[in-house]
Amino acid sequence: MSKKFSQTEASIQSVTERRGVYFRKVKERIIESLMYTISLSVIAAIFCIFLFVGKEALPIFTGKTNSALVQDPIKPEDIDKYSPEQIRIYLGLPKSKFKKLDKETLIALLEVKMEAFKEIPENFKNDKDARVNTTQWKYLIFPHQWTGYDKPVYIWQPVSNIPKYNIMPLIVGSLKVTLIGLLFAVPISVGAAIYVSQLAKPAIRETLKPAIELLAGIPSVVIGFFALLVMASWFQSVFKYEIRLNAFVAGIAMSFALIPIIFSIAEDALYAVPRSIINGAYALGASKWQAAWQIAVPAAFTGILAAILLGFGRAIGETMIVLMVTSASEMTWNIFQGARTITATIAAEMAEVVFGGPHYRILFLLGTLLFGFTFIANIVAQVAIGKFKEKFEGLK
């Protein structure tokens, strides 16, 4: 009897264990499926954002936006001589709204446009600049000689009698600020990473590493406010330049936001180098500096490169610092002249544009360019990392 009871108890225990294993596997599958779904949702959300930005900028890419202030009118009685797409572009209507309008409504809108054309002063009608579609690519990228200028110029001036949307000053301004920020941040952050990971004592490392990483928690607006009130005036008094807010000040302020990011990733990469390699260098008579510079840095170069590229992405997408510290856009590589970045322009002007208008479309075009810069940077990073892995680690 006792033997049967023990067998029954063992059988119940075995069933209970199998049920426990089954439910544990079910839980693990549910959690795995949930994590997979969340990952796909994040990717899908980013893709949808890119689609939305690209969709709003598509009329610029396809040349279907016309910002000319003076256009030859389409007479209401000639409506049948033009295609529906030509009528829609002339009236400046989105496709969804245009499809809902009947012919009588379109004729009424053409009559309104005709009356508005008659009220335009004759001198403005004869102004060649007023007939320029400034959203065409040749005006967005290349210089143009506007009335009153001695030579072709690059101008970003969206709010004026003749709106001008040349984006080259914004691209140059973004690159200037980003490169200046990296020029100051990379040597400091990588040098600090080498010292903390290879040269500093453990007690010093445990203090310095979290202290530097805490700088990443400083809000961008605080850095921008400090740069606006303190750094800009101090640098102007030292270097004696005329324009107080320029690309140099913005780049230096930007470096404060880049240093903790680049330092953290570079230090982790350097610290991950096997100690056996470093100790082997010591055994061969190398000093700490020689081991750090000739052994640790080449071995961790891919991680350092990734840190720099991440810093580049952080800098090119920074908004608040450059919005507070930069001034008017100028097409010049002089770091002491005014500059305006793409992100600052979008942040400052998006709330004031007319929905669906040329200025609105151009700002979304700038957003698309930011996506493009990030994509190209990632491609270059992958190619570079692959080559350095092949060189230093023997991997392809």
Image (cartoon, rainbow, N blue to C red):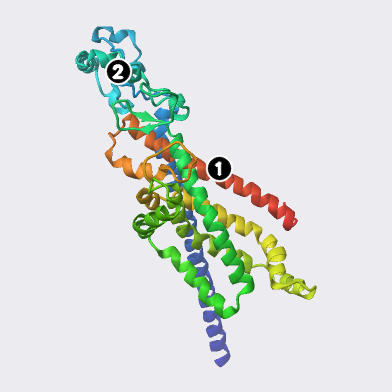
Residue 84: image x %, image y %?
34, 16
Instruction: Say above or below: 78 vs 256.
Output: above
| Camera-side residue of 249 and 316 | 249
Determine whether label 2 and label 1 are within 8 Å by CB: no
Q: Is residue 32 left or right of residue 114?
A: right
Q: Quadrant of residue 266?
A: bottom right
Three-letter code, disc 1: Ile
Q: Is residue 219 left or right of residue 142?
A: left
Q: Residue at x 31, y 32 (%)?
A: 356
Marker disc for residue 204: none
Residue 81: image x %, image y %?
33, 7
User: Where does label 1 land, which residue?
Assistant: 376
Crowd band around label 2 with a 10 angstrom C-alpha radius: few (<14), some (14–19), many (20+): some
Q: Is residue 193 visible?
A: yes
Q: Is residue 32 visible?
A: no
Three-letter code, disc 2: Val
| Camera-side residue of 383 and 202 | 202
Instruction: Say above or below: 59 vs 374.
Output: above
Residue 347: image x %, image y %?
34, 45
User: Where does label 2 land, which residue?
Assistant: 70
Instruction: Say above or below: 224 vs 10.
Output: above
Residue 25: image x %, image y %?
52, 67
Q: Secondary structure at mark 1?
A: helix
Q: Residue furthest right?
A: 284
Q: Which mark lies nearer to you, 2 or 1?
A: 2
Q: Residue at x 42, y 47 (%)?
A: 241
| Camera-side residue of 347 and 390 | 347
Compute the Cα span from label 2 to label 1: 39 Å
